[in-house]
Amino acid sequence: MADDVQPVLCVVLGAPRSGTTWLQRVLASSPSVVSPQETHLFHSYLRPQERVWTRQSRRMERALGDLEKLGRAERRVIGLPTILQPGDLESGQRALVDTLVRRSLETKPGARVVLEKTPSNSLCVDLISRVCPDARLLHIVRDPRDVMASLRDAARGWGADWAPASSAAAARMWLQHYDGARTAVACGDRYMELRYEDLRKDPEKLLSRVLDFLGLPDPPSALLASESSADDRDEELFAYAPMVRARLQRPGAVEPAGFRSGGRAPLSEPALRKAEVILGATARAAGYRDGWAELSGVARVYWRRRARLEEGLYQAQRLWDRAVPRRHGPERSQRGRTRRAGLAPSPSPPR
């Protein structure tokens, strides 16, 4: 990359299983784009820093207030806020992002766009906008019912450690990511939104818009052909540190079995009803208007309560699984996930 050309950071937004990885692979096929694997930089690294800073700042203020008013405090005045300013934390976070951009560009000479794709980016738009005020935000949206079905399949196999094994929790995941990503509309021309279904239907047309958004001259057809002919091995397209890449370059698939789906069964009727009460209105506003269940007032109350109960039980089970070591092997754990996914027989609901 020429010294006088400023790199562009593009952050991909979207719920898990919304086509974010496919879009990443297509764009990473460009000589001008470099994309590390999911870094989880914003949600797993920078967001916890922000939360700890906020918590320590509040405790410090309470302790100082007690000292001033009462002459004593129950807590000591400790933590980074005792010596650093809020801007110092932001500067440190920005430095880490700059390092990510620099290290990524070093792996692909000639690239000028760094594409960061992690679904949890959708939950951190405020943080991303503050730390990276010039970043482009690219949001891909998919029909939530397809996302839920994909999450269901992932939870039964390769994604059991993160994908919700509950249709209600999967619906909530889509809604949280969609609502979070949509806050980026306030970023104006730095934000672009596209639908997965439109991208698959007419990929060259939609991809042309994305390339214009990023200021890239690549022919869409060339990128699509390059991605489709590329090996499924991650190191062929994504950026890695040299030592990591060397260890990846060995026979065998990198992506877990089942990562790419060749088709899946539709959602069950109970799952569709839970989707309706959790995200139906939002999905229709997003353009997904067909095929939703019509629920009476009594039925809507029933399914809303059932969805809340299922979400609560699922979250409680997740906390339990984290706190207590599994002693009964993967077979029993899989049966538990299937039961929590709502596949066991249930009472007949009102319609």
Image (cartoon, rainbow, N blue to C red):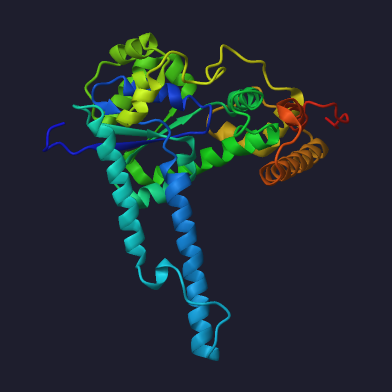
Image position of 204 (left or right of 268) = left
Q: How many marks?
A: 0
Name the spot of residue 220 as percent of width and height, x first.
Answer: 30, 16
The residue sitting at the right extreme is 347
**Front in this rendered view, residue 36 or 330:** 330
**Front in this rendered view, residue 171 or 341:** 341
Name the spot of residue 140 as percent of width and height, x first.
Answer: 45, 30
Residue at the spot 76% in from the left edge and 28% down from the top edge: 332
Residue at the spot 63% in from the left edge and 15% down from the top edge: 264
- Determine whether 289 is above or below 179 in the image: above
To which quarter of the image does residue 201 belong? top left
Quadrant of image for the C terminus: top right
Image position of 50 (left or right of 282) = left
Image position of 96 (left or right of 298) = left
Residue at the spot 63% in from the left edge and 29% down from the top edge: 160
**Front in this rendered view, residue 293 or 78:** 78
Name the spot of residue 176 as percent of width and height, x first.
Answer: 56, 41
Image position of 306 (left or right of 135) = right
- Determine whether 100 is above or below 231 in the image: below
Q: In the rendered image, is residue 40 in sight?
A: yes
Q: In the rendered image, is residue 35 in sight?
A: no
To which quarter of the image does residue 289 belong? top right
Quadrant of image for the N terminus: top left
